[in-house]
């Protein structure tokens, strides 16, 4: 019953937001790199912050630093959706929010300074990777369900590392968001407020699991996004492009824009691929060496990504 009520409340909140966004012209206009061709409401991903608020009011004494952090990144990201902000402001806010999380989880006392520096780089990298990948209908919502579903399985069947509702609430938010976004003509886009806030939530869960198990193999729960983001950045550096500017070199962009494959199909393929990867990761954690698990996952993903260059040769892109 709780989750039915949660779903109804989130539907109501996002519909109210649509009214506000429509009134104040919070929209996404298509440009030369866009996968869409029509003006669409932006910022529908604020639903993830709504979900965090609903969780927080019921667990006031738990994860309060997480809530402060997700509120910080959501506010600045929403502002950036309305009026573009300098990279330094967005990165500073992400750094501050991650600092709150690291303090709350006791990571400053667990790792040496160089280990903490690596955590910062990886956390901010994941946040921005999520944002970079949010480019076609359904990809953020479906991929998030794949990742959170993997966390939920581990939490229930392998090792308990987080509160059950703390994983389910963003899953429900993702499902509600997909109702409006997973369409041929989306009602709304997540915006930076959506991709960055849910990425922040995923990072928190990932850190909880890594601390609990003392294993880095769970980083592969974001393996598909991770491989694509890193290799695309390397591709753009090779092309001598500014990696902070908009582009059309992601594999999903080549498939959807270059080969005209429906966005919903491409998004579903990414989610299914991550589910398959997560199954390998869970099996690897239980039965294999961590380095072997990394190799089993990363080598095929790199080979799969390399297909992009073959496909690019076949079309004028």
Image (cartoon, rainbow, N blue to C red):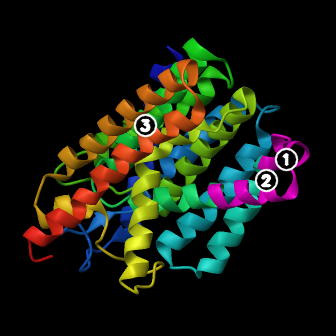
Instruction: State which mark lies toward you, 3 or 2.
Output: 3
Kindly state the secondary structure of the residue where label 1 is placed: loop
* Residue 268, quarter of picture: top left
Please state, as top left, top right, bottom left or bottom right, where the C terminus lies in the image.
bottom left
Q: Which residues are magenta?
A: 102-122
Q: How far is mark 3 from mark 2, CA to CA?
A: 25 Å
User: Which residue is identified by label 3?
Assistant: 296
Residue 10 place in picture, x, y as percent: 47, 37
Task: Identify residue for label 2.
Answer: 115
**Is 115 in the magenta?**
yes
Q: Find out whether residue 175 is within the magenta segment.
A: no
Q: Secondary structure at mark 3?
A: helix
Q: Quadrant of residue 116?
A: bottom right
Residue receiving disc 1: 111
The answer for how far apart the CA atoms under marks 2 and 1 are is 5 Å
Residue 124 place in picture, x, y as percent:
63, 60
Q: Residues within 10 Å of mark 2 (few under 14, many from 20)?
A: few
Q: Are marks 2 and 1 in contact (CB under 8 Å)?
A: yes
Q: Residue at x 40, y 87 (%)?
A: 240
Front position in the image: 311 or 11:
311
Identity of the residue drawn at 73% across and 32% down? 214
């Amino acid at each position: 019953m709780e989750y039915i009520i949660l779903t109804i409340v989130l539907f109501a909140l996002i519909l109210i937001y649509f009214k506000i966004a429509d009134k104040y012209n919070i929209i996404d206009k298509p440009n030369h790199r866009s996968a869409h061709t029509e003006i669409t409401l932006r910022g529908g991903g604020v639903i993830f912050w709504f979900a965090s608020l609903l969780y927080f009011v019921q667990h006031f004494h738990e994860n309060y630093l997480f809530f402060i952090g997700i509120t910080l990144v959501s506010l600045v990201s929403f502002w950036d959706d309305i009026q573009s902000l300098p990279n330094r402001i967005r990165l500073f806010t992400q750094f501050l929010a991650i600092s709150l999380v690291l303090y709350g989880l006791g990571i400053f006392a667990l790792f040496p300074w160089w280990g903490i520096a690596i955590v910062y780089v990886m956390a901010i990298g994941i946040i921005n990777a999520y944002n970079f990948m949010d480019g076609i209908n359904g990809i953020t919502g479906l991929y998030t369900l794949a990742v959170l579903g993997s966390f939920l399985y581990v939490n229930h069947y392998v090792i308990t590392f987080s509160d059950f509702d703390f994983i389910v609430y963003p899953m429900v938010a993702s499902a509600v968001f997909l109702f409006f976004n997973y369409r041929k003509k989306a009602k709304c886009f997540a915006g930076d407020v959506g991709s960055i806030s849910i990425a922040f939530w995923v990072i928190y869960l990932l850190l909880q699991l890594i601390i609990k198990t003392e294993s880095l193999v769970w980083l592969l729960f974001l393996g598909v996004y991770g491989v694509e983001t890193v290799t695309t950045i390397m591709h753009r550096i090779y092309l001598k492009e500014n990696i902070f500017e908009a582009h059309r070199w992601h594999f999903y962009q080549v498939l959807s824009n270059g080969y005209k494959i429906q966005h919903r199909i491409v998004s579903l393929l990414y989610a299914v691929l991550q589910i398959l990867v997560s199954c390998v990761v869970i099996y690897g954690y239980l039965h294999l060496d961590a380095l072997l698990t990394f190799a089993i996952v990363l080598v095929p993903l790199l080979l799969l990504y390399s297909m992009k260059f073959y496909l690019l040769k076949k079309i004028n892109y």
